[in-house]
Image (spheres, rainbow, N blue to C red):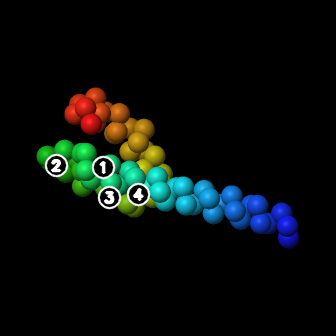
Amino acid sequence: MMLMLPVFFMFFVFAILGTIFWIWMIVDCACNEKSEGNDKLIWILIILLTHWIGALIYLLVRRPKRKQELGK
């Protein structure tokens, strides 16, 4: 029973950090993506529907490209 508490705490912390990261990527995409075309809408939908996995994909795939193109 005592081993369950640290495992539960670890999953709880992971869930909180994943949700914070997810919200950060939604806000980053909504504020910094250009509004031309459907790119912004598609990325927001990807992030919303796939939670932290979509946020991680956005961070690794799109965000560096956006920073290179737009500088923000």
- Position of residue 18 in the picture relative to residue 49 (left or right): right
Disc 4 designates what residue? 23
Q: Give the structural element (helix, strand or loop) at label 1.
A: helix
Q: Is residue 66 above or below residue 33?
A: above
Disc 3 designates what residue? 45
Quadrant showing the C terminus: top left
Disc 1 designates what residue? 29
Residue type marked 4: Ile
| Mark 3 in CB contact with mark 4 (< 8 angstroms) | no
- Position of residue 48 in the picture relative to residue 52 (left or right): left
Report the Cα–Cα distance between label 3 and label 4: 13 Å
In front of the other: 1 or 46: 1
Residue type marked 3: Leu
Residue 64 found in image quarter: top left
The earlier-in-sequence mark between 1 and 4 is 4
Report the Cα–Cα distance between label 2 and label 1: 10 Å
Report the Cα–Cα distance between label 1 and label 4: 10 Å
In front of the other: 42 or 27: 27
